[in-house]
Amino acid sequence: MKLLPIERRTGLTREEFIENYLKAKRPVVFTDLARDWAATTKWTFDYFKKEYGHLEVPIVGPDFHKPGPNYMKSNLTMKFGDYLDMIQKGPTEYRIFLWNIFDYARDLIHDVSNPTITDGWVDKYPFMFFGGAGAVTNLHYDIDCSNVFHTHFRTRKHIVLFDQQQNPFLYQHPYTVQSHVNPLQPDYEKYPALEKATGYETVLTHGETVFIPAMWWHYIVYVDGGYSISLRSRDNVLTQAKGLWNITRHFVIDKGMNTIMGSKWKTWKEEQAVRNAKAAMATAG
């Protein structure tokens, strides 16, 4: 496998971004896209604990993808302040994933704004993500197929990206937008096709934003305990249609079969992913 550095830019203009990154579907790290946000100075661990530490929040851990009726559901809640204390103390696999804090703390939304770098913002889903050092978000691409502008705060976050041309080598589970390979510690004996993949990587630091084009795979590791926000913009009509299909097959087929078949369904998906990768390798020669 080859991982190339994601280009980093300061002072990128709207015209250049749209022409060279948005239309071209190329990732880029903005060092200054969020520099005028109040969030970059206001959002500290102490601030969140003082103002919103009383909130009850859903926590996900290493069993998030465990097959069965609780597949991809949170089965643990705790006080937000207690969770923040936990991720500040040291490594933990527990994350807050796809929880819309703005539904419970509406004032926070005024601390960020949609950048003028592009249009078509999806204002309904400005999700925040929290995780402890070592916590991992498995390789996937976003189910709704939006463009993502992911900004990190305070600490460091390792991001690995792959475009759709790498699909044959990534062992995608059928009826999902997921893969369970680890591109930072690739097991070529178990997943030999992975060796043919080419991706991109970067480590985000405080206030930096990575642009993840629609349908690009991403694997994320919290280097330190911290938090991020994702703003989303719509891509073209075709990818929006793919997003609707992804949502349908996930909630109807994948979740339904998990409830019915449990671990047998996961085993079938893993076996099918291996078969597909073998076929791709044979075709590629």
Image (cartoon, rainbow, N blue to C red):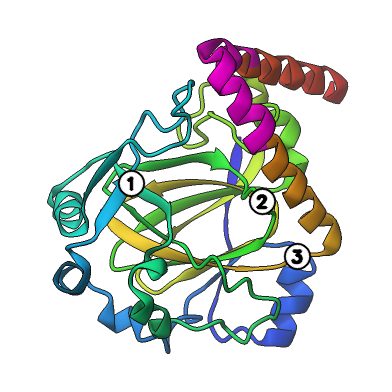
Residue ID at (41%, 33%)? 64
Secondary structure under tag 3 reads: loop
Mark 1: few, some, or many residues within 10 Å (few <14, many ≥20)?
many
Residue 188 visible in the picture: no
The residue under the point 68% across, 80% down is 118
Q: Name the residue under label 2.
A: 216
Tag nearer the camera, 2 or 1: 1
Q: Does the magenta stretch include residue 255?
A: yes
Q: Which amino acid does label 3 sit on?
A: Asp
First-in-chain label (2 vs 1): 1
Sequence order check, earlier mark of 3 and 1: 1
- Quadrant containing the C terminus is top right
Q: Which of 61 and 188 is in front in this view?
A: 61
Residue 51, compared with residue 220, is above or below; it is below
Where residue 235 is drawn, which disc sits there? 3
What residue is rendered at 17% in x and 62% in y?
54
Magenta: main secondary structure equals helix
Range of residues picked out in magenta: 250-268
- Residue 95: assigned label: 1
